[in-house]
Amino acid sequence: MPIQQNTDRIQTTHIGSLPRPHALLDLMKAKLNGKPYDRNAYDATLKASVADAVRKQAECGIDIVTDGEFSKPGFFNVKAAAKAVGISDHHVFLPATAPSGVGSNEYYKSDEEYFHALAGEMSKEYKAIVDAGILVQIDDPFLPDIFFEPGLDDAQKKRRAQIYVEAVNTALKGIPAERVRFHTCYGINEGPRLYEAALADIIEYVLKIEAGSYSFEAANPRHEHEYHLFERVKVPEGKVLCPGVITHASNIVEHPELIAERIVRFAKLVGRENVMAGADCGFSSQALYNTEVHNTVVWEKFKAMREGADIATRMLWAS
C-alpha cells in the first residue's frame, strides 16, 4: 500500500505554515533585512521553535507533521523534533514552492521555456527534501488563478495550466510519486471569494501531477459542495485526496462531528483508504506577527480535526 494511504484509520495533516513565535520572527526579520543579529541566538531559537511546533502538532493528533515553515533548511531540526515525539520520517513533510510561484519570465523566448528551465532548478530543492527522508509538498496556489486571469481565452487558460503541470512534473522527475504531496488553494485570508475558480476547472490538471496526494480547499462555504465532483471524476488508483476539513480563514473552531461528515463524504466516493484530513491552507503564509487566526485557535482546530477523524474512522471501519 502507498505510504500516504490509510490502513486502519483516517490520517490527519495540514498545509504547512503555522504562527511563528515572536522571538523567532524578530530574528528572522533581522536576518532577511541584512541587519545585525545573534547567529547563536537565531539557531537556538529556531531549534526550540521547531521542536515546540512539532510537539504541539503531535499532542493535537496530527499524524503527518512539519516544521511550521519556520526554516526551509531545517531538514535535521524537524527530523530530530519528530523523532523526539515518536514520529517517523515518512510522517514528516516540508513545503516547497511550485515553479509557477517563482519570479517571472524576463529573458526566455517563451513562458514554456522559462518554466521548464525553472523546473530544472527547483528539482534540486525537491530532491534534497526527499533525499533527507521527508515528504515534499509542492505548493501551487497559482494554478487556480489562471482561470480568472484577465485577457486569456479558454484555449490560452488550458495551455497555461498544462505548462504549469508539465513544469512541476519535470521538476519531480526521478522522485517517487508516493513521496510527493501537491497542494493548491484560492486565497490566504477571509473574503467574499466571488472570483475563484471552481474545483471542476482545475481538477483535470491537479490529477495530472505526479504526486501521491492532492490537497485543496473544501471547508470554506464557497467550495464545500464540490465533493460532489468526485461522483463523476475518478481518482487514479493509489492516490489520496486531502481535502480541507478545517479552514485557515476563520477563528471559529469546526465541530468534530461536522469534520467527520466532511471526511465521510469523500470516503464514500473515493474509498476510506484514500482520504486524509487536512486544512484549506496554511495558518501563517505571510509570516506575520498577527495572523488572521489566533495561534491558540490553530491548536484547537487541530484537536477538533483529530476528534472528527476518529469519529469518521469509527464510522468507516465499523463493519
Image (tube, rainbow, N blue to C red):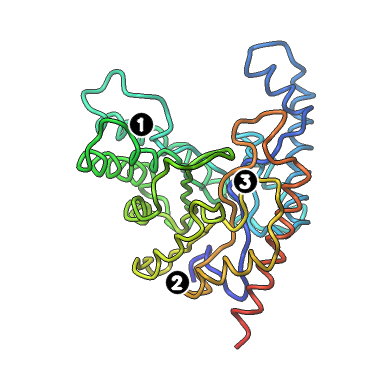
Q: Which residue is mark 3?
A: 248
Relative height, residue 41 to residue 3 (above, below): above
Q: Which residue is mark 1?
A: 118
Return the residue found at the far top: 35
- Along the polypeptide, which appears first: circle 1 or circle 2? 1
Label placed on residue 253: none
Element on which disc 3 rests:
loop
* Residue drawn at (62%, 43%) of the image: 249
Q: Quadrant of residue 34?
A: top right
* Residue drawn at (75%, 28%) of the image: 24
The crowd level at tag 1 (other Cα within 10 Å; few <14, some 14-19, many 20+) is many
Q: Position of residue 168 (x, y in %)?
A: 36, 43
Q: Which residue is mark 2?
A: 270
Between label 1 and label 3, give the one nearer the viewer.
3
* Residue drawn at (70%, 46%) of the image: 251
Q: Nearest the camera: 112 or 143? A: 143
Q: Nearest the camera: 107 or 215? A: 215
| Tag 2 near tag 3, CB within 8 Å | no
Q: Nearest the camera: 101 or 1? A: 101
